[in-house]
Image (cartoon, helix red, strand yellow):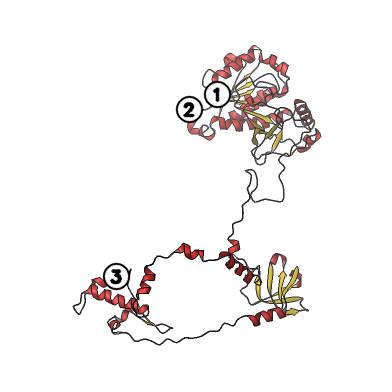
Amino acid sequence: MGCRASVDCGSLGVFQGVISKVCFSDQSVTLEKPYLNGLACKFPEITLKSSDIDELKILKSREDLQSEAAAAPAFGSSVVQVPVKKNSKKNQNIPESLQLPVGKYGAKKTQSFMVNNRASPRHQARASPRGTPTRYRDRQRDKDIFLQGQGGSALNDEEKKMIEEEFDFEANLAKFDKERTMQEIEDNEANEPDVVRLHQSNVRQPEPKYRTDENVLGGPEVINYKQIITGEEEVGNSNFMTDSNLIVPAISLALRERLETAMLRHGFSRERQAEMMGRATTEIAMHLLGGQHRLVPSNMHQVPTAVVLCGKSSVSALGLAAARHLASHGVKTQVFLLDVAHPPQVESELRLYRLTGGKVVTKAGQLPNTTVDLIVTALEDPEICYELLAQERCQPWHRAVTAWAQGCRAPVLAVDPPPQPPSLDIKMTLTWGLPLSHSPQAGKLYLANTGIPRNIYKEVGIKYSSPFGAKFVIPLQAT
């Protein structure tokens, strides 16, 4: 009882005060003149239960507090009565409206309209009833009022000299001992509660520096930017990075073939993949075609035109699905498809595309000679070896289609091309799942989310975590 204590109540805060009551039946303690987290409370006392108390420390004993109170100087109050001075004759001429009542210290005050020791225009405009010039009378009256407020006497020579002398701020500041003053403040505050000190809170703490990809607010979890592990040795352009700085590794052709085999075994058919890639290709193509600025009812006289180039491999199904999706958005489409025997999924996509009313040609000479807004190429098999790809590019039909595309000067979007350098100037490349080791000539690389389950990746030895976030198609940059 009577000791100053510090009571840590966890989330409620830290209380400090003098123990005035301890109740054993309620298991509570009462503090008078309490402080909460260093700030004085508005109420005179507070009662804390033992269930809320994490730790209790005695800061000062009862005897120490009593000795400090006895040693503290007693501050009394005194009242000084100042006799009221009568108004001088000079002040008797002041109107009653300009006189103030006697203050609590006994001195009579009078309102003054002086501005820089000069009479206000209101005084100058008023005529004198006694014939004295108004400006002189007002100046004299203001001077009398000013002197009365200063004690009723004019300044002597020494006082005038002090007023006129220029004050030396640097010399006066040199007399101030800052270190000694701060030490006195520290000594005085050593015995006080842990209140927030203004001179400490004003000290600016150094701010930490953050990277552009680092969360400023921080968090308990550390982001792992390499969340996909293929188990393969890194070769060539083997790593790409998303806009969120997540690492997306490239895979080899052998691992891609194993992934496709696992997808087919679990019912993820090529038709399902073609549908997803056709939708992703259309999403990118819309930006290249002008989007909502071109595909509006008021622009029917300038409908954009897209030409889709398909070869003789199964990747042609992706191009045909893209042509069908583009046609469903009102784009004028035309497909080049080599007149050979095609896989079943290509024939199925071709039948669906013909239902759109789009045109299909089989020779390079039948391609349009008018302005084309976009070229989508699905000519080459991504899993073909380099020797067979070189032989295919030497064939007349391939060279003729490539020459036509180069002459159109339209942007080219490649759908799932092989990792070798392309035969066309590619602006953008779209792939799925995990990318191959595409060369820089493939243009800006995009990755489509075709919805492959994580356990299919796990089945072929890939530790997979989706890099797509809230997007369906994401761009990739080479690291």
Tell me the element at label 3.
loop
Residue 214 visible, this orientation: yes
Q: Which mark is residue 204?
A: none
Tag in front: 2 or 3: 3
The disc labelled 1 sits on which kind of residue? Ala
Front in this rendered view, residue 460 or 165: 165
Instruction: Give the alpha-carbon distance from disc 1 to disc 2, as whole Å.
Output: 20 Å
Residue at (53% x, 17% y) in the render: 369
Q: Which residue is mark 2?
A: 301
**Horizontal side of residue 420 vs 285, given as left or right:** right
Residue at (31% x, 82% y) in the render: 96
Q: Which mark is residue 120?
A: 3
How packed mark 1 is, by other alpha carbons closer than 10 Å (few <14, some 14-19, many 20 or more), is some
Q: Position of residue 347 (x, y in %)?
A: 69, 22
Indicate the quadrant containing the N terminus: top left, top right, bottom left or bottom right: bottom right
How packed mark 3 is, by other alpha carbons closer than 10 Å (few <14, some 14-19, many 20 or more), is some
The disc labelled 2 sits on which kind of residue? His
Q: Position of residue 159 (x, y in %)?
A: 38, 73
Front in this rendered view, residue 32 or 433: 32
Q: Residue 33's image quarter?
A: bottom right
Instruction: Give the alpha-carbon distance from disc 1 to disc 3, as whole Å.
Output: 83 Å
Q: Residue 75's image quarter?
A: bottom right
Tag in front: 1 or 3: 3
Q: Which residue is mark 1?
A: 410
Q: Earlier in the sequence, mark 2 or mark 3?
A: 3
Residue 20 visible, this orientation: no
